[in-house]
């Protein structure tokens, strides 16, 4: 089930984070993080969903809903674009969850009038680079071992015809 994250999802996010390999953590955050504090989890699930967006895909687990994937965007300071991020539980990859999340992020961002979505993606993450490319993101070298993916959300203005 795809739905917005809410404050009650903080324990599920902590469990989800604990399931990640060090490589997944590095691919998602760009550096190593050893644990997810309750405060950090609360901040990540308690976003202002009218401005930013945090979505989760949940499935059945032994003790209720289990978080399988997270997608989010966070608006740039000027509000015209947003940085997105995705992470899918390792044993649930290649099932289309990343694609579903990114398509929903694009749809919502466009509906809110944003000009673009963008992300920094490790050059060592070919699955994410392929997904971004397949959904219309333009890739360019950003930093050492990092690519910048940008997708315009508004059609380019058509030049006015001269008479």
Image: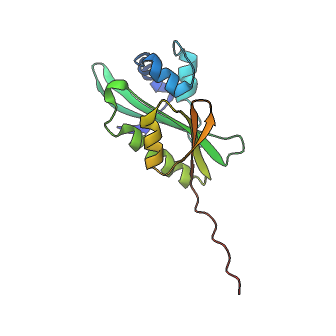
Q: Which residue is found at the position 63% from the left and 71% from the top?
A: 158
* Image mark count: 0
Image vertical order of residue 6 relative to residue 151, above or below = above
Q: In which quarter of the image is residue 57?
A: top left
- Colouring scheme applied when the structure was drawn: rainbow
Residue 16 percent across, percent down from the top left: 42, 21
Q: In this view, does 16 lie to the left or right of 77?
A: left
Image vertical order of residue 77 relative to residue 31, above or below = below
Residue 56 percent across, percent down from the top left: 43, 34
Residue 63 percent across, percent down from the top left: 30, 19
Q: Can residue 52 be seen in this view?
A: no
Q: In which quarter of the image is residue 39?
A: top right
Q: In this view, does 48 lie to the left or right of 125?
A: right
Image vertical order of residue 87 relative to residue 116, above or below = above
Quadrant holding the N terminus: top left
Residue 146 percent across, percent down from the top left: 58, 33
Q: Can residue 137 be seen in this view?
A: yes
Q: In which quarter of the image is residue 48?
A: top right
Q: Which residue is found at the position 31% from the left and 23% from the top?
A: 64
Q: Which of 128 and 98 is in front in this view?
A: 128
Image vertical order of residue 80 relative to residue 91, above or below = below
Question: Which residue is outermost to the top?
Answer: 34
Q: Which residue is found at the position 37% from the left and 38% from the top?
A: 97
Quadrant holding the C terminus: bottom right
């Amino acid at each position: 089930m795809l739905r917005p994250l809410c404050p009650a999802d903080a324990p599920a996010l902590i469990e989800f984070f604990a399931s990640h390999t060090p490589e997944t953590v590095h691919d998602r955050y760009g550096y190593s993080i050893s644990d997810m504090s309750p405060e950090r989890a609360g901040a990540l699930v308690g976003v202002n969903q009218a401005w930013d967006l945090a979505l989760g895909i949940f499935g059945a687990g032994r003790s209720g809903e289990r978080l399988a994937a997270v997608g989010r965007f966070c608006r740039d300071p000027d509000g015209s674009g947003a940085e997105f991020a995705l992470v899918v539980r390792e044993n649930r990859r290649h099932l289309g969850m990343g694609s579903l999340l990114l398509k929903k992020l694009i749809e919502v961002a466009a509906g809110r009038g944003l000009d673009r979505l963008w992300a920094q993606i490790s050059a060592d993450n070919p699955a994410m680079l392929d997904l971004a490319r397949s959904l219309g993101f333009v890739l360019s070298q950003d930093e050492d071992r990092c690519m910048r993916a940008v997708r315009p959300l508004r059609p380019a203005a058509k030049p006015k015809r001269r008479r």
